[in-house]
Amino acid sequence: QVQLVESGGGLVQAGGSLRLSCAASGNTFSIDHMGWFRQAPGKEREFVSAILRTGGITEYSDSVQGRFTVSGDDARDTIYLRIDRLKPEDTAVYYCAAAIRGTWSRSNDYDYWGQGTQVTVSS
């Protein structure tokens, strides 16, 4: 089993920046890649970004390319999501997820999920 704990969410003004963290514990050796998803009120959960756990390979959705940066700290089994130039439409619950295998952008391919952290962007 793998446990994921997100942190770093909050209320931010549009144009600001935020860094989310996701700490993994448990059988982390089984993880192939970790991802970030978000879910806005009344909308489906959408893929944001993902990173190979043991290397620097990353992937982003087209909607966040250029403003979001995913990174990882292998020594601590922690990944980060930095969000720059925040927009009100970035308001959502952001979830961290971990996968043993499968595609990177499909939520159904992820095996473990964190509880989510709320990001609210005021205009």
Image (cartoon, grey):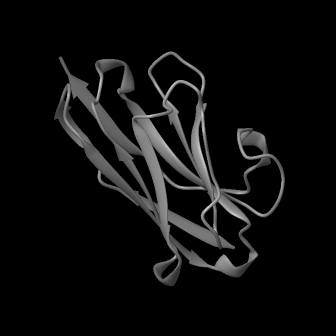
**Rendering coords of residue 81 (x, y %):** 42, 51
Quadrant of the image containing the N terminus:
bottom right
Is residue 2 something that shows in the picture?
yes
Residue reaching furthest to the bottom = 75
Tell me residue 78's x, y (percent): 47, 70
For residue 96, side relative to residue 8 (left or right) = right
Q: Is residue 41 above or below residue 5?
A: above
Question: Residue 3: image x %, image y %?
Answer: 57, 69
Left or right, 70 with reference to 31: left
Question: Is residue 27 in view?
Answer: no
Residue at 51% over, 46% down: 95
Viewer-side residue, 27 vs 66 = 66
Residue 53 quadrant: bottom right
Describe residue 81's horizontal placement relative to residue 58 as left or right.
left
Front-most of residues 92 and 17: 17
The residue under the point 46% across, 80% down is 76
Question: Which residue is drawn at the image coordinates 27% and 45% (left, top)?
Answer: 18
For residue 41, which quarter of the picture?
A: top left
What residue appears at the point 43 percent right and 40 percent down from the top-left corner?
68
Image mark count: 0
Image: 32 above or below 87: below
| Quarter of the view holding residue 120 | top left
Q: If the image is split into quadrants, where does the C terminus sit?
A: top left
Relative image position of residue 13 (x, y in whole percent): 15, 29
Up-down relation of residue 7 to residue 123 (above or below): below
Task: Describe residue 123's horizontal placement relative to residue 114 as left or right.
Answer: left
